[in-house]
Image (cartoon, grey):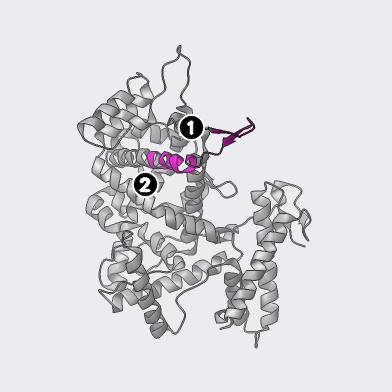
C-alpha cells in the first residue's frame, strides 16, 4: 500500500509540519471565519456519537465508535484537568508551594531574579494530592451506591442491566475509569457489588463534556445527588482552589491539604485529625472520608491513575478527537482490536502488545467490567487481564513478536503512524475503493486528504487561539 512507502510518509509529515507552522504564524488564511458561534463547524461531527440500540447482551460485541469517541473526549478532559491543577496558583497557595526567588548581584551591583527551575517539579505533588482525594471520594461514592436505597442514589434496572441515573463528578469518574482498567483487581474487589454490573455511561458522559474547553459539567441535580450521598460538594477542583492560605487573623485558618493522607499509621491519623482542627464542616467531612477509606485500595487507585497519565498524554498528542479521520481511525482500531483478541486466543502465554489505537478500544471494552469478562471468555476462551505495570523492556520485546504474528496471520502491518495525514489518507483510500468507481485516482485522494487535514488544523489553531473558527467554501 502507498502508506508503507517511507518517501510517502516523509512527504506527508513534512507537509503536516509546514501547514501547522504556516497557520500558527500568519494572520491570513484561505478561509472565511464564522460570524457567530452557531455558524461554526461542529468538530467532531455529532453524527459520530450515535450510540444506537443497547447490545450489551451480545458477548462478542466489540465497543462502538460512539463509545470510543466519547472515551477520547473523556481522556482529553482528564488531560486538561491535570494541566489546570498544575498551573493553578490558588492550589499552589493551598499546598504551600511558592517560587524560590534567588537574587544574583552582578559585579556592578546590578541584580537579577533567577527563574525557579524546581517550581514545576514541586508543583507535581498537587496532582498526586488531587488524585488521592479523588480516590477517597470514589470509595465513598462506591459505598453510597451499595446503600443507594437509603440516600436516593438511584440506578435504572432493566433485566439485570444497571445504569446510573446521574454521573458522578469528573474526579470520581477518573478513579473509577482507572480502577476498571485493572480488570482483575476490579473484579476481585467488586464482583459481588452493583458497581461491577454498571458500565461506564458513555452517552451521559458525552452530554456532560464541553468539547471546546474540555470541561465536565454535571448539572445541578447530579451535583445535589452526589453531595447528599457522599457528604461533600461535587466540584473538587473548586474546593482545592478555595482552600487558599491567608494571613487574616480574624478568619479561621484554612485546612492544610498536605494534612490529608492515605497512611493508616499513627502519624497519618494524627495528620488527618490536625487537618480538621479548624472546626470547619467541610474539612471535618473529608477527615471522616479519609479515616473511613480503605487506605491500601485508595493508594492503589491513586497509583493506577498515575500510570494512566502517559496514555492520556499520548491521546492528547495525537488528538484524534479533532481529526478529520476520527471515525475511520476508530473503526479501523475496532477491527484491529478484534484481530488482537484473536492473537491472544491463538497464542496463550505470549505477551501480545497493543498499538495505541488498539489500546484505546481495549480500554473502552474494559469500561464495562461484567461484559468485558464475558466477552473475552467468548472471544479468547479465557478472561484477559490488562496489566499496566509491565516493564518497558518486556513490552518492547513483546511488540516485536506481536508485529510478526499480526503480519503472518492477517497480511497487514501492525504498527500504524496515527498522525492526521496518514489517517486521512487511509480513510480517503477506503472511501474511494468502497465507492466502486473503478481505478482509484491516488492524486485526487491525496489532494482531498491534504485539504481536509489543512482545514481541520486551521480549526484547531483557531480554537487554541480563542478565535472565531474558519469556514470552508
Q: Which mark is residue 72?
A: none
The single residue placed furthest to the bottom in the displayed view is 439
Determine which residue is flagged by label 1.
98
Residue closest to the far left: 266
Percent coordinates x, y for residue 260 in the rendering: 33, 32
Residue 177 makes an appearance in the image = no
Q: Is residue 267 above or below residue 391?
A: above
Which residue lies most toward the front here?
A: 107
22 lies left or right of 340 = right
Residue 378's place in the image compared with 462, above or below, is: below
- Magenta span of residues: 103-129
At horizontal 65% and vertical 70% (from top left) the residue drawn is 14
Q: Which numbered disc flags the more N-terminal residue, 1 or 2?
A: 1
Q: Quadrant of residue 134?
A: top left
Give neighbour class at mark 2: few <14, some 14-19, many 20+ (Cα, 10 Å).
many
Which quadrant holds the N terminus? bottom right
Q: Residue at x 74, y 61 (%)?
A: 472
Residue carrying label 2: 175
> Which residue appears at 50% of the width and 38% of the height?
219
Q: Is residue 117 magenta?
A: yes
Q: Is residue 176 above or below residue 385?
A: above
Q: Residue 204 at what x, y percent from top left?
A: 47, 49
Q: Nearer the viewer, residue 78 or 18?
A: 18
* In this view, the mark in front (1 or 2): 1
Q: Secondary structure at mark 2?
A: helix
Given residues 205 and 413, the one toward you in this image is: 413
Q: Is residue 181 above or below residue 352?
A: above
Q: Is residue 315 left or right of residue 469?
A: left
Amino acid at each position: 500500500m502507498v502508506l508503507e512507502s517511507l518517501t510517502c510518509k516523509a512527504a506527508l509529515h513534512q507537509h503536516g509540519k509546514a501547514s501547522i507552522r504556516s497557520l500558527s504564524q500568519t494572520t491570513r488564511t484561505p478561509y472565511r471565519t464564522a460570524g457567530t458561534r452557531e455558524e461554526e463547524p461542529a468538530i467532531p461531527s455529532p453524527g459520530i456519537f450515535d450510540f444506537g440500540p443497547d447490545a450489551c447482551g451480545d458477548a462478542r460485541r466489540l465497543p462502538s465508535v460512539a463509545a470510543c469517541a466519547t472515551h477520547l473526549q473523556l481522556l482529553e478532559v482528564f488531560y486538561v484537568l491535570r494541566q489546570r491543577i498544575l498551573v493553578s496558583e490558588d492550589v499552589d497557595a493551598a499546598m504551600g508551594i511558592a517560587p524560590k526567588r534567588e537574587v544574583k548581584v552582578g559585579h556592578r551591583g546590578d541584580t537579577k531574579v533567577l527563574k525557579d527551575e524546581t517550581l514545576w517539579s514541586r508543583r507535581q505533588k498537587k496532582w498526586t494530592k488531587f488524585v488521592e482525594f479523588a480516590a477517597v471520594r470514589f470509595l465513598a461514592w462506591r459505598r453510597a451506591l451499595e446503600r443507594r436505597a437509603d440516600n436516593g442514589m438511584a440506578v435504572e434496572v432493566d433485566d439485570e442491566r444497571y445504569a446510573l441515573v446521574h454521573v458522578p463528578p469528573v474526579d470520581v469518574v477518573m478513579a473509577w475509569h482507572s480502577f476498571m482498567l485493572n480488570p482483575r483487581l476490579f473484579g476481585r474487589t467488586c464482583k459481588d457489588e452493583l458497581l461491577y454490573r454498571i458500565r461506564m455511561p458513555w452517552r451521559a458522559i458525552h452530554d456532560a463534556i464541553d468539547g471546546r474547553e474540555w470541561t465536565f459539567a454535571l448539572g445541578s441535580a447530579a451535583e445535589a445527588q452526589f453531595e447528599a450521598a457522599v457528604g461533600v460538594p461535587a466540584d473538587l477542583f473548586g474546593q482545592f482552589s478555595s482552600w487558599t492560605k491567608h494571613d487574616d487573623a480574624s478568619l479561621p485558618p484554612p485546612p492544610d491539604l498536605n494534612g490529608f493522607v492515605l497512611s493508616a499509621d499513627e502519624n497519618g491519623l494524627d495528620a488527618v485529625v490536625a487537618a480538621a482542627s479548624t472546626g470547619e464542616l467541610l474539612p471535618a467531612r473529608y477527615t471522616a472520608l479519609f479515616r473511613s477509606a480503605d487506605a491500601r485500595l485508595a493508594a492503589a487507585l491513586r497509583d493506577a491513575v498515575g500510570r494512566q497519565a502517559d496514555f492520556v498524554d499520548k491521546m492528547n498528542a495525537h488528538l484524534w478527537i479533532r481529526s478529520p479521520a476520527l471515525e475511520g481511525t476508530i473503526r479501523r482500531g475496532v477491527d484491529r482490536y478484534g484481530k488482537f483478541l484473536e492473537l491472544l486466543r491463538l497464542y496463550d502465554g505470549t505477551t501480545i502488545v497493543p498499538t495505541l489505537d488498539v489500546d484505546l478500544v481495549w480500554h473502552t471494552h474494559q469500561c464495562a467490567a461484567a461484559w468485558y469478562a464475558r466477552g473475552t471468555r467468548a472471544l479468547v476462551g479465557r478472561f484477559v487481564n490488562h496489566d499496566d505495570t509491565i516493564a518497558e523492556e518486556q513490552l518492547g520485546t513483546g511488540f516485536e513478536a506481536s508485529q510478526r504474528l499480526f503480519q503472518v496471520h492477517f497480511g497487514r502491518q501492525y504498527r500504524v503512524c496515527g498522525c492526521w495525514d496518514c489517517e486521512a489518507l487511509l480513510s480517503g483510500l477506503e472511501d474511494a475503493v468502497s465507492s466502486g468507481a473503478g481505478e482509484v485516482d491516488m492524486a485526487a485522494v491525496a489532494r482531498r486528504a491534504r485539504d481536509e487535514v489543512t482545514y481541520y488544523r486551521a480549526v484547531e489553531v483557531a480554537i487554541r487561539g480563542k478565535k472565531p473558527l474558519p469556514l470552508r467554501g
